[in-house]
Image (cartoon, rainbow, N blue to C red):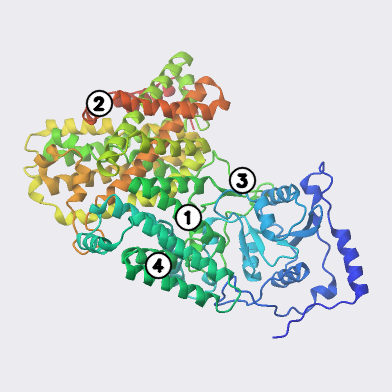
Amino acid sequence: MAFHFFKKNKDEKDQEQKQRSKRRISVEPESKAASELLSPIDPLPEEFAKATLVDVLPRDLEQITRGSKRKFTEELTYNLALLKEQLPESNLVFEQYQVGSVSKKNVVIAYLQGVANEEILREIRRRIGAIKLPAVLESSQIERNIENSNISPFPQAETTERPNVAESALIQGRFAILTEGSPTVLLAPATFFELMDVPEDAYARWPIATSFFRIARYIMFIFAAVLPGFYIALTSFNPEFIPTKLALLIAANRESTPFPIYFETFFMMGIAEAVRMMMERIPSVFGSTIALFAGIVLVIAGMDTGIIGGPVVIIVTLTIISSFGIPNNDLRMSLRIIQFFTMIATTFLGLFGFAVAFFYIAIHMVSLKSFGIPYMAPLAPMEGSAWGHTILRENTRIMPRDETYQPQHDQQQGRVQPKTRDPKAIDPKALAIVLISAILEFELFTFTKRIVQIAEQDAWISILLAIPIVSLFTYLLVKLISRFPQESFFEFSKKIWGKVLGVTIIIAYLGFWMIFVGMSFQNFGSVNQMIFLPETPMIVPLGLLAVGAISLSLYGFAPIVRFFQLIFPFMILPLLVAAALSLRSIDLQNFFPILGSGWLPVLQGTLLFIGVFQGIELILFIGPFFKDKKALMKPALISVNFLLVLILLQTIMAIGIFGVENIKESIFPGVDILSGITLPGFPVERFELFLTLPWLMAMFTTIVIYLYLITEGLLHLLKKQRYRKALTIFVTVSLLAIIYLIPGTSLAIQLRNLFHYPSYLFLYIIPVLTLLVAVIRRKGSLK
């Protein structure tokens, strides 16, 4: 293949060099603002813009199945001309910047004026202007100096060598950063879902197939991240969750292996990494063949000698295959770190370590931003309008635009306003996920026993009667906060009740929450010892849980909401699947006779239920974080009724499967329900896992939201915002200390049985009285 470049004689080159030097911007004067240091580049020479662009040396960094075969090169002027040919629009702007104190090189920012977000542009200018390097050897040096967190394993800028990918990014309102001497172009901002996208998704004809393969890539990412650690946790700590036949096969295969499972897994993953490095480093067309041959020989020899077993080879092979489904090379590198992190956590802590690793990774991902854009958008924060061209691919005849990066247009003044993300301007629809995540823990294991002890087989009728009552009080709570759009209960309670009484009510709420969260910690520790870590001191898992809760609460309310949105499917879907599977085991005879003991036990059960439905009072304190308080009514009612129906289904399952007497004798009916569900031949025959892991997530979300609100309340009373970190740690340590005041599980259960009495006061009586007083005294907005 012949390779042609632009040929110029010496005089032309010297003249061009002089013109380029005039366009270069110096970064030496530190007093200048970044906006002054950058200016649009002069128009490209006419003969250069009209030059014919030809093929260059193909590179294999990005495989191409459909679309343009052109690639960027090390020549900056060629790359700019290539972009100009792809996007001949007049609003395509190039801004040139010179970086390097010893060897100066040009860095160019490309964007579409009127489409790109001006606020993000100013931030990119500022970060490039702050770079102080002696020389820029590759675009990666620019990348790690402008990204939000260079210690994060996740890339915050997309890299590409394909002009059509850069063109698509520019149309979406993103920015392309080109570096002289580097064929790799940086695209910013970048989210997780942008990195999981491939250009062929947009070129494919059938959107259903494209959506299927996109979802397959997300599943492969999860498999590659957690499969080795999950295997260690199940086989080493909780083999009872493995199907019987499979467990026997694994046990028989391990009889001849001298090493523990975790060592086998680490050893095989190490071999996989060694083979991967050999494939990258051997400078030969036969490098991949040699590396694969060496890996196969090692595996076969290990299995023949009994050093490694067959199951771990299957797990590691599936992990490697899944990792190659990740299209972005930098994200694949991040995935390897996650793999070893989850393996270390599960080696020491089993399934609980798996959950902790998941929490820590999720916390990091929801707190991470790329030039102000949340890394997990449009899933967290949830933006359903963007799902059609990020998570899925909608059937559209035109190329959709991602509003995540678009500037907002002020219709009244006719000007472009940069799109900002106010942490106190969260979509009201997110309230539904917040409430479900915070309330879901609500005695998920033990509540059925309590209500059955009172109403017996008619417990489900008690919950049916409670649904309209709880819905009515939820309606009144939203009405109350709608009168004070910019304030939470911490502020407006003093306006309604007076300063002294208002402060007293706030202190009472904080004490109530402290006791509730302390009991939640104790309940968590007890269940964790029973299921996951029976021989580990309770303070170890509680401490790890507390560290994650502290870090997430310190990030603020918006990352907390994003965390809830991210893990919401992992909490709800297993519970719904378990409920569906249990329907075939229900015995209708267990529900008869209906109203056998009359209406009094049913009404007592209803009274108990509305007392223990802890969490709806959160509406009073988190209202100001949402955009439109009046729009909170619908998501609040939907979330509360969804939870009520879910609890009703759980109660029906417990009564229908076990009967009243068995439930009364059980300690944790929720666990017993799923332990009775079996599907012979299914990959998971016992389904306790479908409840225990979602319960861990629900417990964590409950602790996080209450920890945040307790800290907010104390900061409001003390008026010392700079003490947030110290106060958060102090509150957490105090909550952990409460569990040592409760000596045993039986006493903790007795305290929970009595806790619904003060709940009436804080969940219903105080909010309703506050609303009545506000109406009588005409406090708050009347609109």
> Is residue 46 or residue 697 the one in the foreground?
697
Residue lying at 43% horizontally and 32% vertically, measured from the top left: 707
Which of pointers 4 and 3 lies earlier in the amino acid sequence? Answer: 4
Indicate which disc residue 751 carries: 2
Residue lying at 93% horizontally and 73% vertically, measured from the top left: 11
- Between the residue at mark 3 and the residue at mark 2, the CA separation in whole angstroms equals 47 Å
Q: Is residue 419 left or right of residue 702?
A: right
Task: Please tell me in which quadrant of the rendered image residue 73 appears.
Answer: bottom right
In the rendered image, which residue does mark 4 sit on? 317
Q: Residues within 10 Å of mark 1 (few under 14, many from 20)?
A: few
Q: Is residue 757 visible?
A: yes
* Callout 2 touching callout 4 (CB < 8 Å): no
In the rendered image, which residue does mark 1 sit on? 384
Disc 4 on helix, strand or loop? helix
Q: Residues within 10 Å of mark 2 (few under 14, many from 20)?
A: some
Which of pointers 2 and 1 lies earlier in the amino acid sequence? Answer: 1
- Between the residue at mark 1 and the residue at mark 3, the CA separation in whole angstroms equals 18 Å
